[in-house]
Image (tube, rainbow, N blue to C red):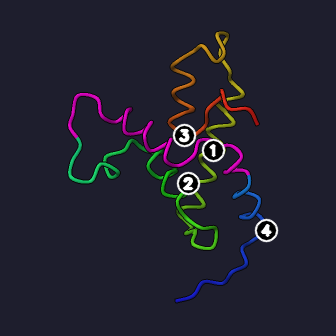
Amino acid sequence: MVREQRLEPEVEVLWDDFHAEVNVPSEQLRQWLLTRGSGEEAFGPNPDLDLPEPGRQILAVLRKRKVDLTPEDIEVMRDAVERIRSLTAAKPNRGNADDEWRHSLLDLGHDVLVER
């Protein structure tokens, strides 16, 4: 089945917003999530399936072409943009030195140390 190549204008804007907010390359995000997810427990036979959420979903969207998006992918993008913007707006007093805050953003694919 061939998908129609044109997307709704709001999805086009969301795609751009998502890629502006998720500023970590997919392989770097995968490595981060593998590090975060490793903890005390060993990975199963397919480590990507054991990645923490919502990072695994964000990573899956990053690996897709715009024309291949599903309604679920669109919701993942919308949620990621909202969560990243909410966290960046609530920057703690320690700023980038606050590891918990920075790691929460990295879990979503956003690195505050990357300049836009």
Most foreground residue, 50 or 85: 50
**Residue at mark 2 to residue at mark 4: CA–CA distance:** 17 Å
| Residue type indicated by callout 2 | Val
Give the quarter of the figure containing the C terminus. Answer: top right
Q: Earlier in the sequence, mark 1 or mark 2?
A: 1
- Kindly indicate whether the residue at mark 1 contacts the one at mark 3 (C-beta within 8 angstroms): yes
Most foreground residue, 64 or 28: 28
Q: Quadrant of residue 41?
A: top left
For mark 2, does the 10 Å Cα neighbourhood hold few (<14), some (14 to 19), or many (20 or more) residues? some
Where residue 36 appears, as percent x and y from the top left, is 38, 32
Would residue 34 be found to the left or right of residue 95 on screen?
A: left
Identify residue for label 1: 22
**Residue at mark 3 to residue at mark 1: CA–CA distance:** 7 Å
Q: Is residue 116 magenta?
A: no
**Residue at mark 1 to residue at mark 2: CA–CA distance:** 12 Å
Where residue 46 appears, as percent x and y from the top left, is 27, 53
Q: Earlier in the sequence, mark 4 or mark 1?
A: 4
Would residue 82 be found to the left or right of residue 9 on screen?
A: left
Where residue 64 appears, as percent x and y from the top left, is 55, 64
Magenta stretch: give its range: 17-42
| Magenta residues, dominant SS class | helix
**Residue at mark 2 to residue at mark 3: CA–CA distance:** 11 Å
Looking at the image, is 102 positioned above or below residue 30? above
Identify residue for label 2: 76
**In the image, what residue occupies the spot 54% across and 33% down?**
106
Q: Earlier in the sequence, mark 2 or mark 3?
A: 2
